[in-house]
Amino acid sequence: MNRLLKSREILLVVIIAIMVASFSTRAPGFASPGNLANIFNDTSILIILALGQMTVILTKSIDLSVAANLAFTGMAVAMTNAAYPDLPLALLIVMAIGIGAFLGAINGYLVWALQIPPIVVTLGTLTIYRGMAFVLSGGGWVNAHQMTPSFLNIPRMPVLGLPILSWIAIVIVLGAWFVLTRLPFGRAAYASGGNPTAAVYAGIDIGWTRFLAFVLSGALAGLSSYLWVSRYAVAYVDIAAGFELDTVAACVIGGISIAGGIGSVAGAVLGALFLGVIKNALPVIGISPFAQMAISGIVIVLAVVFNARAEKKAGRIILRDRAAPEVTA
Amino acid sequence: MMNAVAPTNDLAPLAAETPILEMRGISQIFPGVKALDGVSIKLYPGQVTALIGENGAGKSTLVKILTGIYRPNEGEILIDGQPIAFHSAQAAIDAGVTAIHQETVLFDELTVGENIFLGHAPRTRFGTIDWRQINSRSKALMHQLESEIDPTIRLRDLSIAQRHLVAIARALSVEARIVIMDEPTAALSRKEIDDLFRIVEGLKRQGKAILFISHKFDEVYEIAENFVVFRDGRAVGQGKLKTTPQDEIVRLMVGRDVKDVFPKAEVNIGAPVLRVENYCHPTEFRDISFELRRGEILGVYGLIGAGRSELCQSLFGITRPSAGRLTLEGQPIEIRSSSDAIRAGLVYVPEERGRHGLALPMPIFQNMSLPSLKKTSRSGFLKAANELALARKYAERLDLRAAALSVPVGTLSGGNQQKVVIGKWLATRPKVIILDEPTKGIDIGSKAAVHGFISELAAEGLSIIMVSSELPEILGMSDRVMVMREGLAAGIFERDRLSAEVLVRAATGNQ
């Protein structure tokens, strides 16, 4: 797997480099360090969400509720900030992560205890969380002037040349890498997706592993909610609508197998950056927003085709029989 | 391996009739395995020919050749004396061959009529499906089977036995002259079997040739005229059942003297390690009790569906028993999950490596360390160096051939994958190890290596439960053998009382 993925990740780096280089021939300055840092900063939230999504996908699940979770939690945090401007920012961030994790835990519990397919659970909670955001706000907006300056500005503050938002993304990337490669939970996630039945036989509780993956994804959505609201300086019901699909797309482009068990943090990050570069470049070189969506879509489909071919080579079943019951995903 | 040529009863009366179907010198070779080796059989109109043999003797391969799924490497098939080649499953159906499989593939959500005619539905003039004909012909077919099931009922509303009838009706809905029945009675009660046999008698009267595959001798003698015995991919005997006693058939089935082929070391068997008392499962097995001692190999023999794997999975915590007690080294234990079992020192090497044993995309060393992560981790963090060391140790011990321990398990050959599975469980340092069909699907050379290794483990004091459908393996390796039949322990036999005949009788219920 390592060699295959490594070459795949290097391939992605090369493709992104070629894209940046060719865009810069049309739009001078596109490849300048400042602009690249901008693109990274722009993509930070997608990177964070994609890492949560990736963990869930590794366990052979999917979390379609991340963007709705972000909208609800963002609304809750923004309203709290507006109502109690004296509360310290750290507390608000902890609150955001906590609410997000709780919403993720609801997904995880339904998947784990009630054995409902993750796509159905999160399709349901997607609507519920958005609806809750509406109920919470009564359909109203929280605008920039209602938020405190520190709430709005801290993620933009530059530290060592990069905004804090970018640094948060970098820390999350390192953290995700650590969790997935250095903690037993990470190994359990790969095993649960790679072969759920074998994982059960090896003493791994796949239900619990999936639950934790959803909690992690929810917590990252909660963190992202604050980053999103402060970045765009507004909170309303429809923020980040449809963004869950971007997170899935980033994973797919980055080589995370939608069937679970295969994928790396570097892949997810590169997948997100790939989308970030396209989103930033297309308007610069004057392509209409409608064509942009189509182009993003084509890229995603191509990535899936590429993945499917790679996976076909990787796994082969040696023996098939029916003597023993299979633990289903 | 010895292969004494058994006498073939060439009987004069057969010569008077002409077979509908004849197979001559059929061989089927898979990589590393010769599944069928020069098999010749004949099927006669209006007669039932029973195909008898151990699991893995080549019966299913023959069925797959006859139904056009495999193309044989050698030999020819003749229908009415004309050579014919089946290029596809459809070609076999067109030639008049139909099969009723032991696990029939039907669709719960479709109606009886749709199930019967799926894939060959009658059409109207306009090319649309002719529902009226489907229903009337289905009704006629069911009537022929002495059943009045309404063709518009959905399959999921039928009982198992009724579904079986639908499967038979489906097989008969094509104009078949040759009907293959692959263990058709496996899931049926005695009364349902009687009904089935009446149907078979009806088919005989219509002049169809029937190939009847069964493990059960009483049924075979009841319904069949002729028999063919398969062993190790060869037809080792055939003839008329009327003139052949059961003992003769059992001898043909087993056919070899095996004790000297297996490297079973003499081991001093120690104190009891595991005691299982009155283990029950809601559906799969009942009232199983046995004791396993230190250094002992307990063979578990039985036919497919006897409940052996289910018992093992239950001991390992994959399924919960409904009743029963478990004692490990004198301490009563309760195993609720596989992690409980691993902690207690009881591990299970599953039959299906691919599905139950390995996460194929993961590297070899991560697969090996998966159940031992607690041991290789330091204060909750994974330590790749420890995992690699563990994997290297068992890779060496098992002579695992791999480019590197970091390559995905999916890239290894079957034999090497089996070694990874065994290594993974040995690395947990178990007290009791359950091996489910340890040599299934691997070539003869690797088999001997696995047997040698099992013997070594027993000599080191490990207690082993070895489930196997291969009599030579059971006879050659076991200190004692528990035979299971239809979810019950049909007997436990000491090594000095072991013989193929005894085990087959216990397993088939043929006293």
Image (spheres, rainbow, N blue to C red):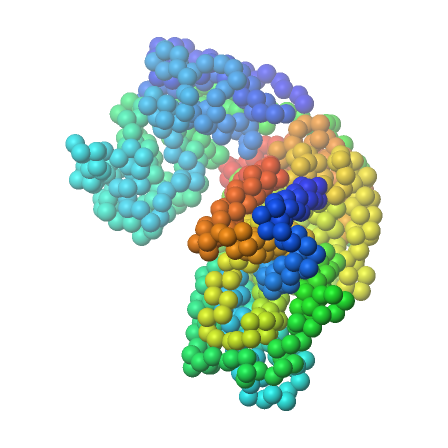
Q: Is residue B326 left or right of residue B97?
A: right
- Image label count: 0
User: Residue B314: where, in percent of width, then height?
Assistant: 60, 55
Q: Is residue A91 above or below residue B165?
A: below
Viewer-proximal residue among B192 and B72 = B72
B316 vs B137: above or below? below
- The answer to whether residue A159 is visible is yes
At horizontal 60% and vertical 37% (from top left) the residue drawn is: A313
| B11 and B212: which is toward the camera | B212
Q: Considering the image in quadrants, where does the N terminus of chain B appear?
A: top right
The residue under the point 59% across, 40% down is A310
**Residue A13 in the figure: left or right of residue A284:** right
The foreground one among B493 and A244 is A244
Is residue B473 something that shows in the picture? no
Residue A134 in percent (x, y) is at 44, 77
> Is residue A125 placed above or below B308 in the rendered structure?
below
The quadrant holding residue A58 is: bottom right
In the displayed image of the protein, which residue is found farthest to the front? A28
- Placement of A32 over or under B392, stated as above or below: below
* Identity of the residue drawn at 59% across and 22% down: B34
> Residue B456 in the image: x percent, y percent?
79, 39
Please name the residue shown 36% across and 26% down the image: B90
Expressed as whole percent of the image width and height from the top left, the position of residue A235 reads 51, 76
Task: Give residue B492's quadrant in the image.
Answer: top right
